[in-house]
Structures are given as structure tokens and as C-alpha cells.
Amino acid sequence: MLVLILLTVLVSLGFGGIGAMLALRTGSVEAVESAFPLFFVSIFMSSINLPRDLIEADWFRYVATANPISYLVEGLRSLVITGWDAQALTVGFGCALAIVVLSLAGASSFLRTRVAR
């Protein structure tokens, strides 16, 4: 249960960091709000509705494989449905940490730029 909460917090922190990065870069509320459709499409073009091995359409399986949200979902799904799947959890945590590090590094860089102005 604790691992599930930790992975969920990392995913939330990563997506929040992306929003903060957009806000600090543009300085516009509209830019952050306009990112919602992109998040929405990327979530539904992942394996959130169906595991990748059950997706029959080749193009959709390819897009879901290239989408990092699929790996976050599969890590969470492995804890809830199948139990401890070390590979899915490792890839899920790695992807979540990469998103957190990149988004918070970008946000802090944009904050320094915005404060210096």
C-alpha cells in the first residue's frame, strides 16, 4: 500500500511540475489551461484503458508503447491487480522519477529566469 501511495505521489508531483514549468515559462494562466487537452489526449493514448498486450491495433499499441504514461499506469496497475511485478514497478518508478526531475529542473530554471527579470 505504501508503494502505491509513493508512486501516485511521484506521478502527481511530476505532472504538477510540468504545469509549474509551463506557468513559469509563459507567465500565462491560459497557457497552463491550454495544456489540459494535451494531457487528456496523452492519457487516453496510453495503456490506461487496456494493457498493451491486449491492444490489437498495431498503431495504437505503438503509440501506447512510446507514451511514458503507459509505464506509469502499468506500475500502478501491477500493484493493484497482479501484485508485485518488479519490472513494471522499476520502469514505473524510473519513468516517474525522470518526469519529476526534468519538470522540477525546468521549473526551477524558469523561476530563476523570471525572478531575474
Image (tube, rainbow, N blue to C red):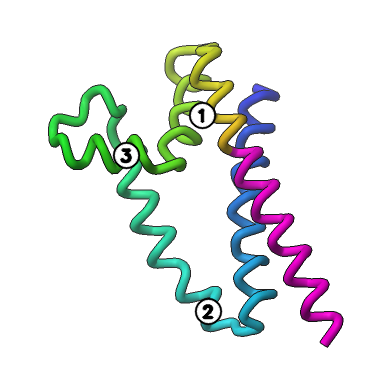
N-term mark: 3 or 2: 2
Judging depth in this view, the residue of 107 and 13 nearest the camera is 107
Q: Could you classify mark 1 by the number of other residues whose Cα lies within 10 Å: few (under 14), some (14-19), or many (20 or more)?
A: many
- Name the residue carrying label 2: 31
Question: Where does residue 92 sit, x and y in percent of width and height?
Answer: 54, 30
Label 3 – label 2 distance at C-alpha:
26 Å
**Callout 3, which amino acid?**
Ala
| Nearest to N terminus: mark 1 or mark 2 | 2
- Label 1 sits on what residue type? Leu
Seen in the picture, residue 27 relative to 1 is either above or below; the reply is: below
Give the Cα separation between the discs numbered 1 and 2. Answer: 29 Å
Residue drawn at point x = 51 percent, y = 27 percent: 75
Q: Pointers 3 and 1 in contact (CB under 8 A)? A: no
Q: Amino acid at mark 2?
A: Ala
Residue lying at the far right of the rendered structure: 116
Where's residue 16, x and y in %?
A: 64, 57
Label 2: element kind: helix
Q: CA distance from mark 3 to mark 1?
A: 16 Å
In this view, 66 is above or below 111: above
Up-down: is 5 above or below 19? above
Q: Which residues are magenta?
A: 96-117
Left or right of residue 115: residue 93: left
Q: Nearer the viewer, mark 1 or mark 2?
A: 2
Name the residue that disc number 1 marks.
Answer: 76
Quick one: SS at disc 1? helix
Image quarter in which the C terminus is found: bottom right
Judging by the rendered image, the residue that carries numbered circle 3 is: 64
